[in-house]
Image (cartoon, coloured by chain):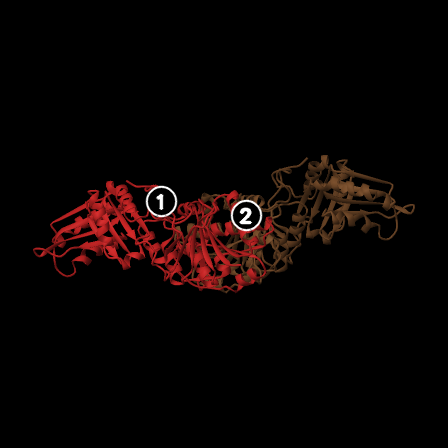
Chain colours: A brown, B red
Amino acid sequence: MALYVQKYGGTSVGTVERIQGVADKVKGFREAGHDIVVVVSAMSGETNRLIGLAKEMQEQPSPREMDVLVSTGEQVTIALLCMALEARGVSARSYTGGQVKILTDDVHMKARIQDIEVDGMRADLQQGRVVVVAGFQGVDPDGNITTLGRGGSDTTGVALAAALKADECQIYTDVDGVYTTDPRVVEGAQRMDKITFEEMLEMASLGSKVLQIRSVEFAGKYNVPLRVLHSFQDGPGTLITTEEDDTVEKPVISGIAFNRDEAKLTVLGVPDIPGVASRILGPISRANIEVDMILQNVAADKSTDFTFTVHRNDFAAAHDILLKIKDELGAREIVGNNKIAKVSIVGVGMRSHAGVASKMFDTLAGDNINIQMISTSEIKVSVVIAEKYLELAVRGLHSAFDLDAADTVSE
Amino acid sequence: MALYVQKYGGTSVGTVERIQGVADKVKGFREAGHDIVVVVSAMSGETNRLIGLAKEMQEQPSPREMDVLVSTGEQVTIALLCMALEARGVSARSYTGGQVKILTDDVHMKARIQDIEVDGMRADLQQGRVVVVAGFQGVDPDGNITTLGRGGSDTTGVALAAALKADECQIYTDVDGVYTTDPRVVEGAQRMDKITFEEMLEMASLGSKVLQIRSVEFAGKYNVPLRVLHSFQDGPGTLITTEEDDTVEKPVISGIAFNRDEAKLTVLGVPDIPGVASRILGPISRANIEVDMILQNVAADKSTDFTFTVHRNDFAAAHDILLKIKDELGAREIVGNNKIAKVSIVGVGMRSHAGVASKMFDTLAGDNINIQMISTSEIKVSVVIAEKYLELAVRGLHSAFDLDAADTVSE
């Protein structure tokens, strides 16, 4: 007898048949005696279809009207899922974000949730109904429809689970859990039974695409147990939860994340004086280019080298900006490389274990992989290497940190 | 400087280009200094697409969820039209039925409007905004989405015009006004500049498909001047309004309506005793078959004949019902005919002119058309004739009552 908030994404409700599959699944949970709140996205393709119509009307569609438009996508799904549930004899009731109501600020297309009224949903649950809520949307204090931005349905699920004090927020996806690393790269990659919020956050921000970062932050903040599961396969999935006391048996590192989308830029020989960093990154940030790693080593000879990484798509634009300000900066040269990759080891275990970083560097050195940049946080170590070594590095680290499944051996 | 409520139906907003055409039209009215509230339907085809999805989910979809589903159709249109207006530099703001709010009772799929809040719309109008409202939908006292039933967007337009005390409610359609009769049948049919609510009601209920009956009733009740216009052609259209004092010059009859969708059934030789009519029509009504004309002549010989008309699609079902209860009724025989048509002359002028009915009968007799049934109201006379005489009858009457355009002559 638990209360679960279950979120099904666009692919999981992408066709009439899949919505019926979700209804079957929800029916099973009801028959097992659980209370269920379902959060759904728009049927896959629908949001893009609506955005396409909008662009035909106005080059930069009004954000307020954009929210009125795209919020219909989820509204269609909630109604269809309720019908499918009722057809199976499962009492259900749909809610738009405004009907719940999920109160947000008034920033259209990327609103943030401020409050959730739970009385209506609680009354339905008490009457044995499944509550079906449109994800990704809310309503501002003036009654305008808002959306949380793309992928925001995960956040709706977590926020509802927090507000309802649900036992678990279950995110149904097209994978059966969170893996120690990408199984397409390492054959022996294993599904983790459990991972902490902090680790999941690092994994997500370092390139693992299973969950939206914001929903993980939210779950961690409100301590909502989060479980990633496969929509159409049975299995325990991966539970994302707070760090437990009995971490004795916890592996030193939990997973290996990587990211091929990076490029690095170095400003060589800038004067080592205060304000240099902001004079370099100011113009980059004003061009809406996001910067990931930033590295500046100690100065030798009154000048220093300043390196940072950007998304590979922004490489050319960032390079142009630096060339334009090179003389003004007093820099000697601008060099760049967009054939790099970032590999990170993540784990709360490394807090209490010295030597994790050096083991990582040793492993890479053993494979003759040169490390170009290093960045660390309390629970992760990231390195930038040449892209061609990515698979070699990930496999070597996966094995070195004993993450391989028992029945596979990495050489 | 007038306030107009303009309603554009599904065909008028059926494509991206047509929505842009509506935006151009509305922009013209704004530039002429008028305040505009626009009511729109779903893009043509969209409502049927959604209903199709629903039927795949549940044989008899839940009415509450059906309203959640189909109301998205108009919501898409209001957003797109606002974008098209903004792209033309016309400030605009969309409202769903719930946002207005258009308060209805809780009868899903055929709700009735109970109240409309106008403060939000008035504030927008005062700020120079075009207000764009989703037709056909409202919200019940518990916040559930309701719909007014198909075609209900006309009713939304009239209700908004009444609540806002608009100067006119303009219904944009695919015809340029209301005609004295169907121009496809009578070449000389003329667009009427003006017609009374009562006449329009009779015309609508007798087969003229220009306006929803309910919206005309509503307009008459609240005395909202209603104008029928063509969406994409300029022209004055037809104004539907209250009867004016100076009806001296008014023609005796205003128009001729007809209906090919009828079938008649007669129960021959039923005992002429109280309760017979209800014993015949009770089972018909319980089968959800609507009855139009009912005729029972004085009894001869202690038995009588009872005739009524139904929609042609219901003819077989009604016939079966009568056969089943024939013996119980003590009737001699059941006869029916589904090759009939109803022709009606309509006009408030006939109130003050004797002999209108006899002129109608004379005209038909002159063409050797036999009258099978007659029914009258204060401002109309309807006759049922064999279907094959329909065009002949309409043309003859159109000419006899001087409705032909000056430059055409009916023989």
Q: Along the horizontal axis of the image, is A15 left or right of A203?
A: left
Chain of the residue displaying label 1 = B
Cα–Cα span, label 2 and label 1? 35 Å
In this rendering, does residue B323 appear at all?
yes
Give the residue number, with chain letter if any, for mark 1: B406
x then y, percent, for residue B57: 41, 47
Chain of the residue displaying label 2 = B
Give the residue number, with chain letter if any, for mark 2: B24
- A53 is higher (above) or lower (below) than B136: above
x then y, percent, for residue A317: 74, 41
- The residue drawn where x is 23% and y is 42% is B339
x then y, percent, for residue A128: 43, 60
Which element is circle 1 on? Answer: loop
Count of numbered badges drawn on the protein: 2
x then y, percent, for residue A295: 80, 47
> Which amino acid type corresponds to the residue marked 2 in the rendered image?
Asp
| Label located before the other in sequence (2 or 1) | 2
Quadrant of the drawing holding the C terminus of chain B: top left
Q: Which mark is residue A338?
A: none
CB atoms at circles 2 and 1 under 8 Å apart? no
> Which amino acid type corresponds to the residue marked 1 in the rendered image?
Ala
Which element is circle 2 on? Answer: helix
Rate crowding at label 2 as few (under 14), some (14 to 19) or many (20 or more) other CA atoms within 10 Å: some
Q: Which residue reaches farthest right?
A: A301
Rate crowding at label 1 as few (under 14), some (14 to 19) or many (20 or more) other CA atoms within 10 Å: few
Which quarter of the picture shows residue B114? Answer: bottom left
Q: Along the horizontal axis of the image, is B227 left or right of B289?
A: right
Front residue of A263/B49: it is B49
Q: Which residue reaches farthest left?
A: B301
Which quarter of the picture shows residue B158? Answer: bottom left
